[in-house]
Amino acid sequence: MPITYIKKIMILQAEHLVKFPFYEDHKRPGLLVQLAEDVLFSVTRMNIDFIIEQQYKPLLRPLCELEKDLLSEHDMPETLRLELYWVTESKDCKLLSPKTKALLAKNLFDIDGLIEAGLAVPYNLEWKKDLESYWALD
């Protein structure tokens, strides 16, 4: 009897988004979704249910951007730098400390593979003039 594999279809859920900073929580950019090619929309506590219902894709930074950021950050603690370097080499966030995962999420990095699953859009914060690339280490 042949083995058949059923591909599990993933859908975007609130648990995927709540680990990222909401726009109203910070003075720096928070989580955005893409409504259309050139239309970005802020994710807030008030609209997260709508975002999930409509399955709008969040814009997240791919892990490959970590290497560029690592080279530019001079005041990053060495233990953090080593752990993040490991992520750039392995492309896997599963074994990172909770503190480092929280840091990556705070800086809008895709820590759950949502981009590869087709649930998020790769986004470089430097592409938009009104947003800046940043590292929030506090």
Image (tube, rainbow, N blue to C red):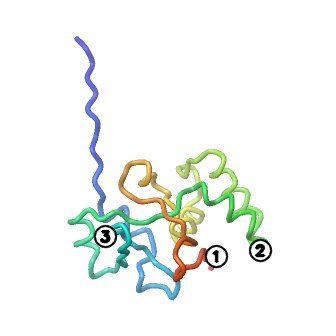
Q: Residues within 10 Å of mark 2 (few under 14, many from 20)?
A: few
Q: Which amino acid lies under the numbered mark 1 shown in the image of this protein?
A: Leu
63 to 52, vertically: above or below = above
| Residue situated furthest bottom in the rendering | 27
Give the residue displayed 26% in from the left and 62% down from the top: 55
Mark 1–mark 3 contact, CB under 8 Å? Answer: no
Element carrying mark 2: loop
Q: Earlier in the sequence, mark 1 or mark 3?
A: 3
Give the residue displayed 72% in from the left and 61% down from the top: 81
Expressed as whole percent of the image width and height from the top left, the position of residue 120 reads 39, 59
Q: Which amino acid lies under the numbered mark 2 shown in the image of this protein?
A: Asp
| Residue situated furthest front in the rendering | 38
101 with respect to 25 (left or right): right
Between the C-alphas of marks 3 and 2, the distance is 36 Å
Mark 2–mark 1 contact, CB under 8 Å? Answer: yes
Res 115 → quadrant: bottom left
99 with respect to 113 (left or right): right
Which residue is labeled 3 in the image?
Answer: 35
Q: Which is closer to the viewer, label 1 or label 3?
A: 3
Determine which of the numbered discs, if any, sits on residue 137 in the image. Answer: 1
104 to 133, vertically: above or below = above
Between the C-alphas of marks 2 and 1, the distance is 10 Å
For the image, the number of numbered tags is 3
Quarter that holds the N terminus: top left
Determine which of the numbered discs, if any, sits on residue 23 in the image. Answer: none
Which residue is labeled 2 in the image?
Answer: 75
Task: Name the residue nearer the viewer: 132 or 12.
Answer: 132
Q: Earlier in the sequence, mark 2 or mark 1?
A: 2
Q: Earlier in the sequence, mark 3 or mark 2?
A: 3
Quarter that holds the C terminus: bottom right
Expressed as whole percent of the image width and height from the top left, the position of residue 89 reads 66, 46
Expressed as whole percent of the image width and height from the top left, the position of residue 82 reads 73, 56
